[in-house]
Amino acid sequence: MKNLMIAFASLFFMNCGNHNAQEKKNQELSNATPVEVKATTQGYEKAYFASGCFWCVEAIYESVNGVQESISGYAGGHTENPTYEASNTGKTGHAEAVEIIYDPKVVSFKTLVDVYFGSQNVTQKNGQGPDIGSQYRSIIFYQNKEQKEIIEAKVKDLQQNYNKPIAAEIMPFQKFWEAEAYHQDYKKHHPNNSYIRNVSNPRFQKFKAKFPELLK
């Protein structure tokens, strides 16, 4: 019995140590200086969002007028070269995210933020819908002071309508890792996939009904 108690105690302290280490890494990332991504040679800018499965989020943003492309990937973590399998363990700190390449003359960052909050359950922590875990948590990334102010103003305004806190983390952008090729345009290439039919499509239809004026 004594040995069993020691084993349980060791496991408890090990888990606490891992949790504290993760919290420390998250705090370091939150305090980091944001990295501002340069515009493309065509004048397109880039923005980064995480709100659940990137198959869903990618399709939503690609339907928005002014968005040239939406790329699935990983962001917000502390490891190099994350993979789908590694990020799904929750140990890399990364969340499934999208890189949005957009024309600022057609759609503003503020509108992209409206799309972000308007296409998810804003109070669901560590997940969206049936997708649960830190890899599915909502994170909105800023690259400069102006973007941070836009995000914070939106959150403050939204919070007035909810009793629960807005779940999205607001983080300084550091780096985006592009996901494996088979994840790109997944909804388009696999329309009959059960997840696409039962989760992605209903979420997409709700977004379309809410923002018809933004659609291509």
Image (cartoon, rainbow, N blue to C red):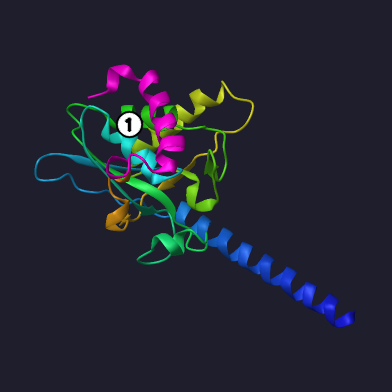
Classify the position of the C terminus by image quarter.
Answer: top left
Quick one: 108 or 143, which is closer to the camera? 108
Q: Residue at x 50, y 39 (%)?
A: 168
In the rendered image, residue 19 lying in the magenta stretch gets the answer no
| Residue interval drawn in magenta | 187-216
**Farthest right residue in view:** 1
Residue 207's place in the image compared with 19, above or below, is above
Q: Is residue 170 left or right of residue 178?
A: right
Q: Position of residue 50 (x, y in %)?
A: 41, 44
Say if the magenta span includes residue 192: yes
Residue 212: image x %, image y %? 32, 18
Q: Position of residue 134 (x, y in %)?
A: 53, 52
Q: Residue at x 38, y 63 (%)?
A: 83
The total number of labels drawn is: 1
- Residue at horizontal 27 percent and vertical 44 percent from the top: 189
Q: Quadrant of the N terminus?
A: bottom right
Name the residue type under label 1: Leu
Q: Is residue 121 above or below residue 187?
A: above
Looking at the image, which is closer to me, 108 or 9? Answer: 9
> Does residue 149 lie above or below 185 as drawn?
above
Image quadrant in which you'd find residue 47: top left
Residue 109 seen in the figure = yes
Please identify the residue farthest to the front as the structure is shown: 192
- Name the residue rendered at 41%, 36% in the picture: 197
Q: Is residue 160 left or right of residue 194?
A: right
**Percent position of residue 156, x then y:** 51, 27
The residue identified by callout 1 is: 112
Neighbour tally class for label 1: few under 14, some 14-19, many 20 plus, Cα within 10 Å: many
